[in-house]
């Protein structure tokens, strides 16, 4: 069942034509990854889906409803949460306050309690540091916090922008395991990564973005074997 | 190591160093001589301190408005002094009417609450209108542009009040219950000062609790860090900005009433000096920092009240108290020179984690 459908999306930064007609579908329960070099338009795609950027043309359909012109702060109420690039935690707020902000769109106190237990279950480190100012956390802990904060919104679709950026390999592994676990619990994931190998190893399907266009799309297995992908993104000759 | 350190010192550092040492020297020598001469009694010093704290509380309330808006929009709301004036001025009409009908004397407590209500509501209306008309359409404009409209809005407000009510001072009625003072030995405090300090403390405590512990307060802090990310959380950024203006304006309105109770006169131009002093206080404490504005306000009030006599009297400066504004604004210049981030402010260069 199609959950998210981008159809012929054109997005501009001022006069720069950043996305040149992108079409992507994500089915319920999938992990889909978007790979590509720096500046290919991966982050722009996610910002368009979340309403931080408005596309000039095209539709973004979530469960059949066009949300392309909705405001960013309304879209989280539709069930989309994002772990932004560079983590984007609120550095001067405490860990718990960051999680509270993640739950801003939620109203039920009981659900909040279950959600925060779930996040602390996934990331025990956050529980230990719940009263610490978020800016003093290590990079890995900040990534956990950004992920936990997104989960507090109880999303059906989770967008992740470069979760492995700047993290030690052990932590990258932990984050990817967590993504799989979150997915098993029923959250659909759209994952943007530069670390194409890791991304393709947990994803069902993938899209390759180049200069604002989709140049390849296939199952993750097939993409891993594709010679152009191997050469350009997996560092194999 | 040492060589590299010496190489990095340039002419500006040396000039600043000399100014710094000279000022500290002047302050120390001045204070020492003033105290040695002993022209002032303990009672007088205590009076200066109490006056400074009361005055500083009013500055702090206004400074919070500057700091709240700066924290969230990174702009100086130069119309804030007129938000303060509008509340104080409008409440004058309520005060005059209540004085005429006798309600002010018969029911002083309720009457003062009504004054606060009128002043705060007027300030809120003016503050929100300024945001809506002069700032919101320019949200994506370069930062200099809203600064210019801020100054424009400030002038418009001043001259609207002048046009409507003339340019004479209007005298607030004197309230019988607020006359007189309490004395404990050498310590003397007027009833009005008690009202000013207590109300300001209550309002600041309320603001602090609101910003630290309510959902909206946390959202305000989130918006002040990153508007895009805050929007991703489902926070309506524009609504939060309006609430920030409401809070700042309400405090300015309350400050306007306390100011009017203390000095008992209003005028269309009355916002200018308290406004610019409060701005100084906000910078002094570290602009954008809420406890900083409170500390900065009290500190400036004290400095301005105790400073002229303490530093200058011993140096045989005639009529030092006339120089209190010089002292206050010298503080602003010095803070900008030596610690641009203010007493409690973060270093601006500190990389965002």
Image (cartoon, rainbow, N blue to C red):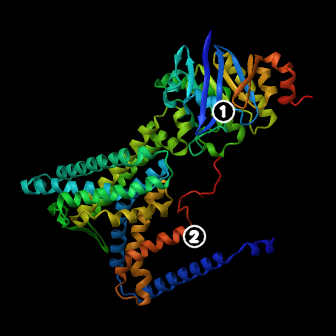
Q: Residue A211 in the image: state x and y as whole percent.
A: 72, 32
Q: Nearer the viewer, mark 1 or mark 2?
A: 1
Parent chain of label 2: B
Q: Contact (CB < 8 A) between labels 1 and 2?
A: no
Query: Label 2 belongs to which residue?
Result: B338
**Mark number for residue A43?**
1
User: Quarter holding the N terminus of chain A?
Assistant: top right
Residue A173 coordinates in the image, percent (x, y): 78, 29
**Chain name for mark 1:** A
Where residue A209 sits, quadrant-wise, is: top right
* Up-down relation of residue A227 to residue B97 (above or below): above
Q: Which part of the image, by quadrant, shows the C terminus of chain A?
A: top right
The answer to whether residue B231 is left or right of residue B85 is right
Q: Is residue B129 above or below residue B347?
A: above
A7, B200: nearer the viewer: A7
**Residue found 65% across the figure and 79% down from its top:** B14
Left or right: where B114 falls relative to B307? left
Secondary structure state at the residue bearing disc 1: helix
Query: Neighbour class for label 2 at 10 Å: few (<14), some, many (≥20)?
Result: few
Q: Residue at the location (39% across, 65% down)? A: B276
**Image x and y of residue A116, in percent:** 58, 27
Q: Secondary structure at mark 2?
A: helix
User: Within 10 angstroms of label 1, few (less than 14), some, or many (20 or more) residues?
Assistant: some
The label shown at residue A186 is: none
Point 48% across, 64% down: residue = B284
Real-space CA distance between mark 1 and mark 2, rounded to the nearest whole angstrom: 41 Å
Say left or right for B128 vs A152. left
């Amino acid at each position: 069942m199609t959950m998210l459908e981008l159809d012929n999306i054109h997005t501009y930064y001022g006069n720069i034509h950043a996305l040149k007609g992108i079409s992507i579908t994500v089915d319920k329960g999938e992990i889909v990854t978007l790979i590509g070099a720096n500046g290919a338009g991966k982050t722009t795609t996610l910002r368009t889906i979340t309403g931080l950027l408005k596309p000039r043309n095209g539709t973004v359909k979530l469960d059949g409803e066009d949300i392309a012109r909705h405001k960013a702060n309304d879209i989280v109420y539709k069930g989309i949460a994002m772990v932004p690039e560079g983590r984007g935690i609120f550095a001067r707020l405490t860990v718990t306050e960051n999680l509270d902000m993640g739950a801003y769109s939620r109203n039920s106190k009981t659900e909040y309690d279950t959600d925060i237990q779930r996040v602390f279950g996934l990331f025990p480190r956050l529980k230990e540091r719940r009263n610490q100012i978020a800016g003093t956390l290590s990079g890995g802990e900040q990534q956990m916090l950004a992920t936990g904060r997104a989960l507090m919104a109880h999303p059906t679709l989770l967008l992740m922008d470069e979760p492995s950026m700047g993290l030690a390999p052990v932590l990258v592994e932990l984050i990817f395991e967590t993504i799989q676990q979150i997915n098993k619990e029923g959250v659909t994931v759209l994952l943007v990564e530069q670390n194409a190998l890791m991304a393709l190893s947990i994803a069902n399907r993938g899209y390759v973005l180049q200069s604002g266009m989709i140049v390849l799309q296939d199952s993750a297995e097939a993409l891993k074997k594709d010679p152009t992908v191997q050469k350009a993104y997996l560092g194999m000759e | 190591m040492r060589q590299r350190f010496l190489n990095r010192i340039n002419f500006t550092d040396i000039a600043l160093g000399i100014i710094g040492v000279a000022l500290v020297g002047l302050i120390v020598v001045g204070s020492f001589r003033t105290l040695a001469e002993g022209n002032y009694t303990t009672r007088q010093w205590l009076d200066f301190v109490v006056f400074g704290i009361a005055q500083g509380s009013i500055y702090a309330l206004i400074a919070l408005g500057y700091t709240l808006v700066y924290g969230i929009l990174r702009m100086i709301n130069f119309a804030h002094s007129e938000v303060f004036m509008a509340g104080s001025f409008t409440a004058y009409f309520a005060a005059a009417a209540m004085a005429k009908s006798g309600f002010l004397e018969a029911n002083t407590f309720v009457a003062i609450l009504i004054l606060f209500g009128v002043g705060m509501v007027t300030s809120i209306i003016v503050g929100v209108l300024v945001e809506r008309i002069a700032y919101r359409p320019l949200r994506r404009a370069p930062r200099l542009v809203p600064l210019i409209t801020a100054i424009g809005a400030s002038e418009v407000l001043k001259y609207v009040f002048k046009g409507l009510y003339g340019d004479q001072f209007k005298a607030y009625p004197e309230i019988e219950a607020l006359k007189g003072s309490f004395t404990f030995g050498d310590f003397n405090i007027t009833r009005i000062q008690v009202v000013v300090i207590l109300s300001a403390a209550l309002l600041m405590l309320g603001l602090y609790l609101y910003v630290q512990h309510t959902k909206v307060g946390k959202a305000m802090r989130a918006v002040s860090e990153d508007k895009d990310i805050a929007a991703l959380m489902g926070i309506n950024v524009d609504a939060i900005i309006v609430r920030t203006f409401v809070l700042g304006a309400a405090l300015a309105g309350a400050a306007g009433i306390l100011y009017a109770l203390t000095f008992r006169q209003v005028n269309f131009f009355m916002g200018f000096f308290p406004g610019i002093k409060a701005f100084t206080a906000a910078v002094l404490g570290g602009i954008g920092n809420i406890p900083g504005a409170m500390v900065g306000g009290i500190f400036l009030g004290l400095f301005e009240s105790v400073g002229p006599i303490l530093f200058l009297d011993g140096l045989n400066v005639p009529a030092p108290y006339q120089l209190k504004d010089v002292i206050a604004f010298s503080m602003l210049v010095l803070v900008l020179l030596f610690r641009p981030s203010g007493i409690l402010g973060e270093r601006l260069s500190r990389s965002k984690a």
